[in-house]
Each structure stands twice: as structure tokens, then as C-alpha cells.
């Protein structure tokens, strides 16, 4: 059994560095002296408990006044994997499902199996008019990062390729994500010509109401579509019934579930080009354009135009990323 460190807790940054260098697997007991909780928590509840503990013990973690923020959480190998943010840097950590033991990092002891889902750009099937689908969760920080990558390329290639934004068939960011997914789905359905104006506004600050006004969306038409779509797919009904949630943790969003199943979508963001899931790294407009242009039988002249090769930061805002690009909500 690994030794438990309950005193002189190792600063988080040092722990992560040590793990990368030495391959150690160190864990810290949470909640000593606090009320015991033997129940199983949701991924977000356990992660937030861990993050609250870290923030409440700033000196022990040598954070020097920096606040730790929650990004996302999911179940992985009988524990919860969660992503936290300190300043501009993001890290993956782990916590037990009862929220009692924090693992600052982990070592995968088994090699990753070969996957035929993620295709390299060179393996994309070519066509005269590539079909490009971006699957996101509307409040996923990495989905927002990918949408900011998507928008300049859409403006460039919208007449040459079929490009669209779609939604992952479950949510990870509370009821607000269901509401926003429904809004964006219905804007595309009812007033598709205004959708990208709305999205260009939304990714800046997440202010949906002002973006609806800015994009001149017909709110009566939108409200009717949202209500009808919600009823057709039992979205709110399933949200209120936790027995229907995916893995007991994630409310379902079945509006485009058929496409999710067809392409094996497993998180936000997922890029599908000509029916193949592809990796885009870094998530810059220029890299995204290059990947799409490789999918043309005869690349159009727009492919010679150079876009920004800087990835945007995750989350809202148009700042360039200072910590690279990558990560997903899954």
C-alpha cells in the first residue's frame, strides 16, 4: 500500500514536476479533521471538494495567493479525473469517488490501445466539397476554443466546404449548457444565416441575451423552437430524472444523438471531416484550414490564404493561448 502523506503536503506544482520526472504516484488525504462522508459523489462534486480543499489550504500547497479553478471532471478507471486551472496553466488530477483522497497526478501503467477513430490529416478521404462537422458542448472550455478556431475558417471556406457546428449528446456544465445548446440548435434551424454572427459574439463573453440582440435573432421564433425541441427529445424531462443520466453523472442531450453514434463522438470538441474523426493540433485557424484543405480533391484558391497560426485560449475570450492547446470535456 502506498504511504499517505497527511502532513507537510507537497506543493502542487512540485508534485506535478516530480511525477513527470520521477514517475512517482503520490496522493494526499483530503478532509482530515472534517466530517466524514462515505457516500459516492458525482464527478463535479468530488472535484469541487478537492479544489475547495486545495484553496482552503493555500499555504500547504504553496499557491502564494493563486486561486485554483474547476474546469471539468469525468469518471476514469474507478476514480474521477478532473481538470483544474491555476493562473493560465491547466492540470489533470484525480480524486476518489467519495471525495476523500486526492491524487495530484497519475501514471498510466497500460499502453493506450491502437485506435482507428482518430485519423491523421493525411488519411482523410478527399472530396470535391469536404463535409466538416465540429461537435461541442456549448460551455466546454475546449469546445469554445475549437469554435474560435472554426469561425475564421468558416468565413474563408463556407462557399467551398460544408461546415457546421453540432452538439455532443450529453452535457457536463449544468442546466445552462442545455439551455444554450437548445438556443444554438434552434438558431441554426430557424435562422441559420444569423447563427455565425451569434456564435462570434457568444464566444467572446458568453452573454447570450446581448448576442441574440446583436445578431437580430427573432426571439419569439427561437422560444417556440426551443420549447418544441425540448419536448420532442425529452431534454428537460431527462435532466430532471437522474436515472436517465449517462453513467449516472451526465444529463443527456439527444437532439443529434444519431450523428454522435454514427461518428463515435466521445467528447467536446470532436472534429469530423468526410465522415472521419480527425485531430487538429494546435487548434489554430491556420492548422484547421490546412487539415480541411487536404480533404479537397482540388483545393480552392482560398487555401492559399494564410490565417492566424496562434491557438485561442480555452473558455470565453479572444486571447491567444499561453499554455498551448488541447484538452477536451469527456
Image: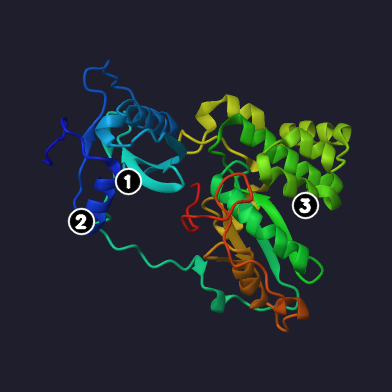
Residue 255 at least partly seen: no
Label 1 to label 2, Cα distance in Å?
19 Å
Q: Residue at x 64, y 35 (%)?
A: 178
Whichever of labels 1 and 2 marks the residue nearer the N terminus, that label is 2
Q: Residue at x 78, y 31 (%)?
A: 227
Q: What is the x, y in percent for residue 197?
A: 80, 49
The numbered dot on residue 196 is: 3
* Disc 1 element: loop
Vertical arrangement, residue 257 with respect to residue 310, above or below: above
Q: Residue at x 67, y 76 (%)?
A: 293
On screen, residue 322 versus residue 92, left or right, reads: right
Question: Total number of numbered labels?
Answer: 3
Q: Quadrant of residue 10?
A: top left
Q: Nearer the viewer, residue 246 or 285?
A: 285
* Disc 3 element: helix
The quarter of the image holding the N terminus is top left
Whichever of labels 3 and 1 marks the residue nearer the N terminus, that label is 1
Q: What is the x, y in percent for residue 68?
A: 41, 36
In the displayed image of the protein, which residue is found farthest to the front?
A: 64
Vertical arrangement, residue 266 with respect to residue 214, above or below: below
Q: Nearer the viewer, residue 175 or 261?
A: 175
Where does label 2 land, which residue?
23
On screen, residue 188 versus residue 293, left or right, reads: right
Amino acid at each position: 500500500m502506498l504511504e499517505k502523506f497527511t502532513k507537510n503536503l507537497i506543493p502542487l506544482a512540485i508534485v506535478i514536476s516530480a511525477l513527470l520526472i520521477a514517475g512517482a504516484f503520490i496522493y494526499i488525504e483530503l478532509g482530515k479533521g472534517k466530517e466524514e462522508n462515505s457516500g459516492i459523489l458525482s464527478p463535479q462534486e468530488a472535484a469541487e471538494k478537492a479544489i475547495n480543499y486545495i484553496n482552503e489550504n493555500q499555504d500547504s500547497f504553496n499557491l502564494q495567493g493563486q486561486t485554483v479553478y474547476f474546469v471539468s471532471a469525468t469518471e476514469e478507471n474507478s476514480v474521477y479525473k478532473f481538470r483544474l486551472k491555476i493562473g493560465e496553466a491547466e492540470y489533470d488530477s484525480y480524486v476518489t469517488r467519495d471525495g476523500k483522497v486526492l491524487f495530484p497526478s497519475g501514471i498510466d501503467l497500460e499502453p493506450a490501445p491502437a485506435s482507428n477513430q482518430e485519423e491523421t490529416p493525411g488519411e482523410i478521404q478527399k472530396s470535391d466539397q469536404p463535409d466538416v462537422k465540429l461537435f461541442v458542448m456549448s460551455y466546454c472550455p475546449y469546445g469554445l476554443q475549437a469554435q474560435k478556431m472554426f469561425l475564421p475558417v468558416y468565413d474563408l471556406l463556407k462557399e467551398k466546404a460544408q461546415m457546421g457546428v453540432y452538439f455532443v449528446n450529453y452535457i457536463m456544465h449544468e442546466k445552462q449548457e442545455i439551455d444554450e445548446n437548445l438556443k444554438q440548435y434552434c438558431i441554426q434551424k430557424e435562422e441559420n444565416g444569423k447563427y455565425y454572427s451569434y456564435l462570434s459574439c457568444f464566444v467572446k463573453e458568453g452573454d447570450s441575451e446581448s448576442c441574440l440582440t446583436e445578431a437580430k435573432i427573432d426571439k419569439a421564433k427561437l422560444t417556440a423552437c426551443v420549447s418544441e425541441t425540448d419536448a420532442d427529445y425529452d431534454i428537460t424531462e431527462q435532466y430532471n430524472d437522474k436515472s436517465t443520466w449517462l453513467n449516472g453523472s451526465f444529463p443527456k442531450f439527444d437532439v443529434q444523438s444519431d450523428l454522435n453514434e454514427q461518428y463515435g463522438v466521445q467528447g467536446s470538441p470532436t472534429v469530423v471531416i468526410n465522415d472521419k474523426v480527425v485531430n487538429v493540433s494546435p487548434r489554430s485557424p491556420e492548422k484547421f484550414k490546412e487539415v480541411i484543405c487536404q480533404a479537397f480533391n482540388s483545393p480552392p484558391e482560398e487555401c492559399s490564404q494564410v490565417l492566424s497560426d496562434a491557438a485561442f485560449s480555452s473558455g470565453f475570450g479572444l486571447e491567444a493561448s499561453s499554455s498551448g492547446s488541447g484538452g477536451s470535456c469527456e
